[in-house]
Amino acid sequence: MDRSHSRQRSNAGSPKRPKTEGNGPGPAARPGGSAKGPSGPAHRAHWLFGVHAVLAALANPKRRKERLLVSKEAGQRHGEALDKLLALPGAPPAHQANREDFMSALPDSAVHQGLALQCAPLTQPHLEDLLAAPLPETARRPVVLVLDQVTDPQNVGAILRSAAAFGAQAVVTTGRNAAAESGVLVKTASGAFDHTPYIAVTNLARALESLKTAGYWSLGLAGEGKRTLADAKSDGPVALVLGAEGSGLRRLTRETCDELVHLPTREPISALNVSNAAAVALYELLK
């Protein structure tokens, strides 16, 4: 079914080293709606790392950047790009860093590629503001990804990367039991985090109802879905809903979706990782 007719367009010393970088709390959300402030703890600076993640964050005028660490090798390899980005308004002070500097700032497991940026979390839009904004001219069709308590930051980062690559409008997630902005998530997104809105909502069922009111047909990915995504998709706006691996979609989320659909996988592998499923589904919807 197509609801498209009803869519309304209208400079400090070495930082303290975090011991681990786990999921932590989900992106901060306000009751009944989407994130009012930055994802994660309000305005608390943290470290991003990796070439694509850091370059995208430096290029984002909405980012509050505090300090940039650059290894000698990375400075030589990416010097031209860094010179341009560091000439922009709001650029942070850059410091040539050695191995010990990176070890002091980042978790042991961080693959930093010679670049690390200390910055504040991004302030994300409200869902209602996203729905009221006109689509970019380059958009093929309105598609929003909705994540039901997907907590793994690498999965979420990969989903954001696919969302940016295929042209989804945004990724909507739960305010609790979700992956907050972190170095691991942003590194896995490979620059996509600073291009694709990551919106937290307190009540996912209510957010789905808002999407439906705005003209989106909500399709939940579930193995027991009677039709395939290809058979069920329409030409109008789509909210694609994915659940956590193992538990899948929660009961209320299932009941709120317009339809449950599946991807036609074959034995012996009957299920995909949630980030792989998101990529396949986005290709089907936006090809």
Image (cartoon, helix red, strand yellow):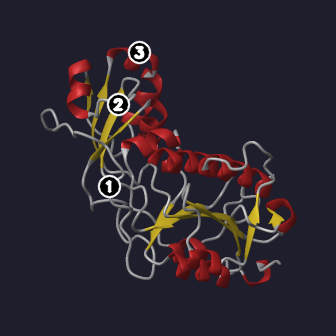
- Of the numbered discs in the image, which one, if any, rests on residue 76? 3
Residue at which label 2 appears: 109
Tell me what residue is drawn at x 21 percent, y 21 percent.
100
Residue sitting farthest toward the left:
13
**18 in relation to 96, above or below:** below
Q: Residue at x 41, y 70 (%)?
A: 35
Q: CA distance from mark 3 to mark 1?
A: 35 Å
Q: Secondary structure at mark 2?
A: loop
Q: Which quarter shows the N terminus?
A: bottom right
Across and down, in percent, residue 153 comes to: 45, 48
Instruction: Say the numbered circle drawn on residue 106.
Output: none
Residue 14 x/y as whole percent? 15, 32
Question: Helix, strand or loop at disc 3?
Answer: helix
| Place of residue 280 in the rendered image (x, y in percent of width and height, measured from the top left) | 73, 49
> How many discs mark residues in the rendered view?
3
Query: CB atoms at circles 3 and 2 under 8 Å apart?
Result: no
Which label lies toward us, 3 or 2?
Answer: 2
> Tag 3: residue type?
Gln
The residue type indicated by label 1 comes to Gly
Which of 104/81 is in front?
A: 104
The answer to whether residue 244 is left or right of residue 61 is right
Task: Identify which residue, 225 or 54, lies in the foreground.
Answer: 225
Q: Position of residue 260 (x, y in %)?
A: 73, 70
Side of 9 relative to 49 (left or right):
right
Look at 47% across and 72% down and name the residue there: 126
